[in-house]
Amino acid sequence: MSDQIINIDSEILGGTPVFYGTRVPIKNLFDYIETGESIDYFLDDFSAVSREQVIKLLEMSKKLLESSSNILHENIA
């Protein structure tokens, strides 16, 4: 499997960020989580996405949030 997790290509869904090697928008995962659905439920609905991709994406998101904590703190204060 590729180390790439996200693909942004103007030829795929008009450049919407998708899971690499699929046409599944990244936003779909966050929509599922937001509504209280489990990762397993998401994976059942989008079998083209692997658990490894989901975990790596969530880890990337966590790192981005941690590295942006100063910016986020300024927006909250």
Image (cartoon, rainbow, N blue to C red):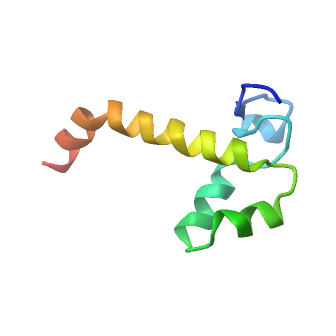
Determine which quarter of the picture holds residue 56.
Answer: top right
Q: Residue at x 61, y 63 (%)?
A: 31
Place of residue 50 in the rendered image (x, y in percent of width and height, measured from the top left) = 78, 47
Determine which quarter of the picture holds residue 21.
Answer: top right
Residue with the most extreme bottom position: 36
Q: Residue at x 34, y 30 (%)?
A: 67
Tally of numbered discs: 0
Is residue 72 placed above or below 7 in the rendered structure? below
Residue with the most extreme top position: 3
Decide which of 38, 76 is in the foreground and name it: 38
Is residue 15 placed above or below 35 in the rendered structure? above
Place of residue 65 in the rendered image (x, y in percent of width and height, measured from the top left) = 38, 39
Place of residue 74 in the rendered image (x, y in percent of width and height, measured from the top left) = 17, 39
Decide which of 22, 63 is in the foreground and name it: 63
Quadrant location, the N terminus: top right
Left or right: 8 with respect to 67? right
Q: Residue at x 43, y 34 (%)?
A: 64
Left or right: 20 with respect to 70? right
Is residue 42 placed above or below 67 in the rendered structure? below
Q: Residue at x 82, y 66 (%)?
A: 45
Decide which of 33, 75 is in the foreground and name it: 33
Residue with the most extreme left position: 77
